[in-house]
Amino acid sequence: MKSLILFLLLSLNCCAFSDQNDSTNWIISSSFSITKMDFFSGMQVFRTIDNWSIGTGIEVGVNRTFFQQRIFPKIAFCGNFKFITKSWVNTYATCNYAFSLCKVNLLNNSFHYWNEIYGGMGLDFGNRFRPFFNASIGLLQESFRNNANNKILKFNTLGFQGTVGLRYVF
Amino acid sequence: MYFRFAFYTLLLASCSKSKNYESVSIIGHGGNGLEILNSFYHDNTLEAIELAISIDGSDGIELDVQLSADGELWLYHDDFLESETNGEGCINSKTDNYLESLEYKTLAKEKFAKLSDIDFNRLKNKQLYLDLRHFNFCSKQLVDLNKVIESLQELGLDHLSEIEIYCVVSTNLWIQPLLNAGFKVMATITEFADFESILQQYPEVNGAVINNKSVNLEDVKHLESLGKKVVIFEVRSPKGIRSALKKYPFGIMTDDIRTALIEKY
């Protein structure tokens, strides 16, 4: 039920932004993604130049953190290159870098940090409102300070991200 | 805009956590979890153990232990090597030389590890659950318990006072010999009612390891009133972790330590 409320609220965000249409080079989007660490929900803004679009966004962890009164914020930077455009469908390559952090154990103030660098493919379709899907894989690094030996530890693994969302093109 | 901000804040505040789970231990199942999709490393590897014990707030790990043909204890969850490694057959029928050459079928290709590879100094003040596998699925015979006990004693695990070590067994035949050898023993049970008969036969047994779905708060309270510990496994999703914590067991064997810590605190 809570997830449904969250989804509806994010949909409202998109509708609210769609009233503003004074530029043709900007895109805003609302997305929901699944990653190794949590489900994330967030918003992005993109600038398009020819076939390229670059953007940034903020997201927040939902399933493992939001409903547990824990904030799991993520900031992401993303670049897309559109290489196939057929009528109203675009296929693009995407790469993104994201940084997120979360206080896992409240008692000893231990923050965990995650760096993610992903590459993948995606597609979107439509005109002004463009639903999109993309999937990417890459490096996921977790780092945190171990209080027992006061060392910063880093662990690397293969990460993934699957995203669905809705874009509005100005 | 203000309405949305207020709504998010209220939604966040409405998910209140009023319970105190301070007494519940968080144990990493197979190190940092058996669920490959969410785990950083394959279960029962040195990498997974290092990650699990490094996270502040984790109270210990559970490992699956199998005896090789040469009498060495190896860490592996499944019955057959081919399911997760580049080897084949059963550990109980393989030599240490063969097992040392194996690696997991993951991208990281973690090396196959034995119990003696663990730096036990890193486990000081932690709990260590050794799930001792008793059946050889290739020869269809019971594993030699005396050899298992000898190997555990060679590692000095019966005298490590700074680590709380529990032998977890799923056959009643192994309970008394392990207790006699000075080990703490917990019995894996599928139904809570099974533990009553185990308790009658082996009153010194230290507790039970039981599936989350098969136990409730009253069962846990009953066993704790008898001085026995309950550890709950099959604890993966946030919902599952929450439901296990609400039963206030001695510990939960979770596949997601971070989420368990977030739920606990």
Image (spheres, coloured by chain):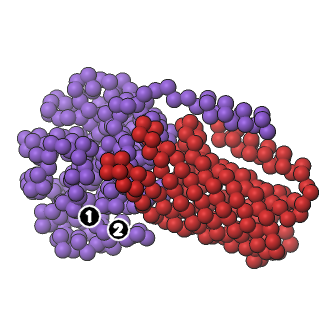
Instruction: Say whether mark 1 and mark 2 are on the same chain.
Output: yes
The residue at the far bottom in this view is A83
| Residue at position x 77%, y 34% in the image | B3
CB under 8 Å between callouts 2 and 1? Answer: yes
Quickly name the residue at label 2: B110
Colour seen for chain B? purple
Colour seen for chain A? red
Task: Looking at the picture, tell me which residue is in the foreground, B219 or B9.
Answer: B9
Q: CA distance from mark 2 to mark 1?
A: 9 Å
Q: Position of residue A43 (x, y in %)?
A: 72, 52
Which chain does the residue under circle 2 lie in?
Answer: B
Horizontal placement of A155 versus B168: left or right?
A: right
* Mark 2 closeness class: few <14, some 14–19, many ≥20 residues within 10 Å: many
| Residue at position x 56%, y 36% in the image | A69
| Residue at position x 9%, y 42% in the image | B182
Three-letter amino acid code of the residue under disc 2: Glu
Which of the 4 image quarters holds residue B64? bottom left
Quickly name the residue at label 1: B113
| Residue at position x 26%, y 64% in the image | B113
- Tell me the quadrant of the picture where the N terminus of chain B can be found: top right
- The vertical placement of A123 against B237, above or below, is below
Q: Is residue A81 visible?
A: yes
Q: Position of residue B226 (x, y in %)?
A: 22, 24
Task: Looking at the picture, tell me which residue is in the foreground, B212 or A40.
Answer: A40
Horizontal placement of B259 versus A73: left or right?
A: left
Q: Position of residue B251 (x, y in %)?
A: 33, 37
